[in-house]
Image (cartoon, rainbow, N blue to C red):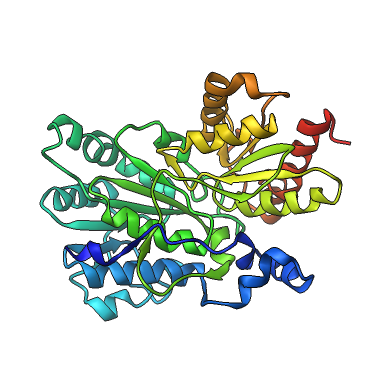
Amino acid sequence: MPWSRIKPDTNEPDFLSQDMHGSATRAIAAGDPDSQQCGAGRRITYAEATNEALSQALSLDPSVFVMGQGVDDPSGMFGATRDLHKRFGRERVFDTPLAETALSGIAVGAALGGMRPVYFHNRPDFLLLAMDQLVNHAAKWHYMFGGAASVPLVFWACVGRGWGSAAQHSQALQGLFMHVPGLKLIMPSTCFDAKGLMLAAIKDNNPVLIIDHRMNFKQRGLVPEEPYTVPIGKGVIRRSGRDCTVVAVSHLVTDAFLAAQDLAGEGIEVEVIDPRTLRPLDEELILASVAKTGRLVICDTGWKTGGVTAEIAAMVVEKGFSSLKAPIARVANPDLPTPSGYTLEQAYYIGQDDIRRAIIKTVRGSEA
C-alpha cells in the first residue's frame, strides 16, 4: 500500500522553532534555552508545507487528485497548490467553475468510487453552498451503510482576514461543522501540522474538513522533508504551566503562546493547549490540564454563541467541574458580521491582548 511509506506520529519540533510573525525570532535572539534546536533542520513556509504534503500525496497514490477554484492559478491558493498542475498534469490538479454544490457532489461521488479528492474551496463562506453534499451525504454514508461504504474526501478552506474581506469572505464557520457527526474537523496552527495533518486527512477513509487561516501563512517553521502524519484527534501542549490553561484554536495558538510568555514575567505560568483537531476533540488532554491548573480560558477565531468555545466549556463543566477554581473565560469574535476596513477590523478581531486580559482576570479575579 502506498500510504505505508508515510511515517506516523513524527515528533514535532519545539513551538519556538517557528517564526510566529517575527516573535519567535526575537525569542531566539534573546537566547531562550527552549529554542536552541531552531538552528537545526529545514525551515519552510506554511504554504510550502501544505504544498509539499499535496505533492507527496499525489506522488504516493494515483487515486489522489486536487480540484478547486484557482488551484492552478499562479498564486495557487496562497501558495498551497502552486505549480502542482505543472508537475502532475491538469487531469489530477484542475480548476473548477463557480458551482460548489455540483462540484461537491462530484467529489463525493469520486470518493465513493475509490478516488481520494482534495477539494479546495478557498473560503469557508463558500462551504455553505456545499452543506448538502458535505453534511447530508459525505458525513453519513459510512454510517448509513454499516461501514460498507467509505468517503475518503478532504475539503479545505481558508479564513480571510486583514484586507477588508468583510462579512461574506471572512467567516470562521468551524462551530457549524463541529456539530456534524461523521465529519472530522482539523484546524492547524504550525507549519509542521499543516503538512502532517494534510497527509493524515488524505489518508483517512472518510471525510475530513480542514479550516485554515490566512494568518498562519505568515509563518515559517521546521518541517521534515519525508512524508509523515500527525494523528487526527490528538492535541498537544505548546507550553506547560501551573496557573491557568488556555485552549486556543488555529493562529490564536500563537497569540496565546506569546501572551503566556509575557505573563511569565509577572509570575503567571500559563499552559497552552493546541487541540489541532476539533472533531474528534482531545478531551483527555484538556481535562488533565484543567485538573492541574484549575482555570480555563478558551480562544477561537469564530463567533462566541453556539461555537467552539461554548462546546469546549460545556465539556469541561460536564466532565471536570470539580477541578475549576474560577469561572471559565471565553475569547472569541463578537456576534456580528465582520466589518470591512482596516480600523473596524482592528476593533473587531481578537488577539494577544484580549487573551492576556482574560488570563489575568481568570487568575487574579480582575483585569488589573
Nearest the viewer among 208 and 274 is: 274
Nearest the viewer among 22 and 325 is: 325
Q: Is residue 180 left or right of residue 167?
A: left
Nearest the viewer among 331 and 287 is: 287
Please tell me whether residue 221 is drawn above or below residue 208 in the rendered image. below
Please tell me whether residue 226 is drawn above or below residue 365 in the rendered image. below
Residue 207 percent location from the top left of the image = 28, 45
Q: Which residue sits at x=73%, y=49%? A: 260
Quarter of the image for the C terminus: give it.
top right
Please tell me whether residue 210 is drawn above or below residue 69 in the rendered image. above
- Tell me which corner region of the image, top left, top right, bottom left or bottom right, holds residue 95: bottom left
Nearest the viewer among 183 and 227 is: 227
Q: How many numbered marks does the figure carry?
A: 0
Q: Which residue sits at x=58%, y=21%? A: 317
Quarter of the image for the N terminus: give it.
bottom left
Residue 183 percent location from the top left of the image = 32, 39
Please tell me whether residue 83 is drawn above or below residue 6 in the rendered image. below
Residue 98 percent location from the top left of the image = 30, 55
Q: Is residue 19 left or right of residue 232?
A: right
Q: Is residue 59 left or right of residue 113?
A: right
- Tell me which corner region of the image, top left, top right, bottom left or bottom right, holds residue 299: top right
Q: Which residue sits at x=21%, y=37%? A: 137
Q: Is residue 65 visible?
A: no
Residue pushed farthest right?
368
Residue 252 percent location from the top left of the image = 61, 49
Q: Is residue 207 visible?
A: yes
- Tell me which corner region of the image, top left, top right, bottom left or bottom right, holds residue 180: top left
